[in-house]
Each structure stands twice: as C-alpha cells, then as structure tokens.
Image (cartoon, rainbow, N blue to C red):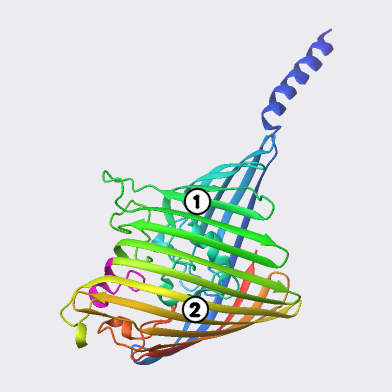
Amino acid sequence: MKKKTIVLAVSVASAVCVAPVSAQSNVTLYGVIDEGFNYTNDAGGKSVYELQSGYAQGSRWGLKGTEDLGDGLKAVFQLENGFNVNNGKLGQGGLLFGRQAYMGLTDARLGSLTFGRQYDSVVDYLGQLTANGNWAGYLFSHPFDNDNTDNTFRVNNTVKYTSSNLAGVQFGGTYSFSNDPNFANNRQYSVGAQYANGGLLAAAAYLQANNPSATSGGAINNGGDENFVAQRLRVFGVGFTYTFGAATAGFVYTNTNVTHPVSDGYLSLSESIQPTTGALAGGTLNALKFQNFELNGKYQVTPEFFLGAQYVYTVANYEATTGSVKPKIHSVGLMADYNLSKRTDAYVQGVFQKIAGAQTGSSLDQAYIPGADDLSSSSHQAVVRVGLRHLF
C-alpha cells in the first residue's frame, strides 16, 4: 500500500510540473561581424586610410524567439545590439539594443502586432528594393540617407502592424508615440505595402515625423544618428525589382521633404546647412527637398560570386528666405562579393559622388558619401572599401 501511495504521488507531481511547459518555444542567438579597410580620396581636404566596422552590413548580435500559444497564435520578441568591432563601442548612440527591441503577438491569418523600438515602413518595404538596403550597405545610401532607406534612424515607442501574406500582397504600418505632454511633438507614423509574384517585387511607402529629435524620449532620437533635425520630415516612394535567371534589376524613386531644418543630424554639423556664402547668404533655410532616382542591378556569376552596380540621380531643392537653388547629385557604386563559405564572405566596393549645378552657399555644396570620414573639400568624393563579413 505504501509503495502504491508513493507511485501515485510521483505521478501527480510529474503531471503538475510538465503541464505549464506544454507550449512550444524557441530562442535563437544570431549575429553579423563586418570589418574592412576604407580609403577616402578627400575628407576635409586629406586622403584617409582607416579600419571601419559594419558597412556592407551593420555589425550586430541579437536574440529572437517565439512561443506557440496555440491555434496559430505566437508570442514573439527580438533584441538586437549594434556594435563597432574596432573599439567595442555600442552603436546607435550607445544604446544596449539600439538596432531593435520589441515584443508582441503574431497570428498566421491575422498578421502581427509588435511594440517597442522598430523599423519604419520605408525601411521595411522600400529599403529592400535599394542597393544599400539589400546587398550593398552603408556607402550606397542616397545622399545623407535622406529617405532613411538605410535605417539611419529607428523609431522608438512604436506600435507596428504587419499583415499576413495575402496572395502575394503584404502591408503594414507604424505609429510611434511622442511620450510628451505635447502629443505630436517628436512622433512618427508610416504605412507601406508590397506585392510579390514570380520574379517581381514591387513596393510603396510613406513616413511622416513631427519635430524629430526635439525631445530625448520621443519617436526619433538616436544620439546624433538622425538624418535631419527639423520641424517636419516627410518621405514617400515607390520601386520594384525583377529577377530573371541569375540577374536582378531594380528601380526606386523616393521623395523627401524636410521642413524648417535646424541641422543635419547625420553629420552633427549644427547650423552649417544654413546659407553663409553666395547669392543666398544672409537667408534662413525654410525647406530642403530631395528626389532620388535609383537604378540598380545584381548578377550572380556563380553560386558563390556576385557583381552589383548602382546609379543614383538626386535632385535637391534648397529653399531659403533669400531664394532657392536646385543642385544635382550623381552617385555611382560598384561591388563584388565572394562567399568563402556559407557564413563568411569577402567583398570590395567603391562609390563616387559628384555635385553639379547651382551652389547653396552651405556645407551641402561639398560632396559627402554616407560613411565617409568627413565632407569633401570639393564637389566630388570617392570611397573604396575591402571587407570581410561573418554570419553566426
């Protein structure tokens, strides 16, 4: 009788312990280490030779996981840290999980709803169609990453919805709270959609931010990593890529409107974007607009080796109280990448930029390739990079 009692007690205890862990869950550790050597022909009037981390792809490590809640519903989370290989410093203004930090729910039929620090819809939908947001990285960004397709900034305090795939169509949007008594002060919202069918991928997106970086706890504040500090930032665009065999070709158009810009946060140049010389001197910059037209192509020569090319034509509209001018910016990028293994690749890439047309009388007359050490001392600049990347 005593033995039967012990067996029964053990059985009941086992049942109680096992029941709470019946749901299936998993956690994945992952990361990217990207290191390389950069040469810039003109940075502040001098040639620069330097080691730089995270250019073809941002160096990072992260944790992501899911828990199956049953009936197609799952809990999800992702925490992603950016860092610099050369000095060990945190990226994104020194934030622990500056790249992403969110949790939420996802349903196979209804889509996902997530909360935290995330990417906006321009990054999610349009970024994947650009060379910089897909296979090339930082150096291939549009001037000043004015449209954020290279995710210069992430958005805090964000609620994001992403639909499930509906016959090739997927859509979503974000709303980022200001967390300020003034509800609209440093808030952000965006929407986007994409369509995939065979080799075609097409997308469109829109973003608006009110007083980005005006507060320390609002939607956009990355400790100096913002592209522009202004009264209002608006971005919209459309694009597509088409894959046929080993080749992929794409076109992207984006339109950025920066109203009453205070500074170029991307370079932390304070008031240097204001007109100080030339015909517009003495005025105040009211608006800065960019139209970016990108053509890109990639050819998979072998399963291990690809070649890529990009051309971007940017029309800038510089509107000051003393008048307006429209400088043109030409950017050309080339890249070759070879996989040494499934997780490690070596690459070489180069970008050349030239500013043509009217002068603004500000630092924007000097060429600047995103990722270069400094502004050029002239209207043109070139950067060449040789890199090594490892995924884990």
SS of the residue under disc 2 = helix
- Residue 375 in percent (x, y) is at 35, 84
Badge 2 density bin: few <14, some 14–19, many ≥20, Cα 10 Å? many
SS of the residue under disc 1 = strand
Tell which of 82 and 116 is nearer to you. 116
- Residue 154 in percent (x, y) is at 44, 59
Q: Which residue is mark 1?
A: 173
Q: Which residues are magenta?
A: 260-273
Q: Which residue is mark 2?
A: 139
Q: CA distance from mark 1 to mark 2?
A: 27 Å
Residue 317 located left or right of residue 292: left
In which quarter of the view is residue 298 placed? bottom right
Tell which of 142 and 69 is nearer to you. 142
Asked if the magenta segment contains residue 266, the reply would be yes
The residue located at (43%, 72%) in the rendering is 145
The residue located at (63%, 44%) in the rendering is 66
Q: Quadrant of the N terminus?
A: top right
On residue 221, the disc is none
Q: Quadrant of the C terminus?
A: bottom right
Tag 1: amino acid: Gly
Residue 232 located left or right of residue 200: left
Give the answer, above or below, for where 349 lies relative to 69. Answer: below
Q: Nearer the viewer, mark 1 or mark 2?
A: 1
Q: Are marks 1 and 2 in contact (CB under 8 Å)?
A: no
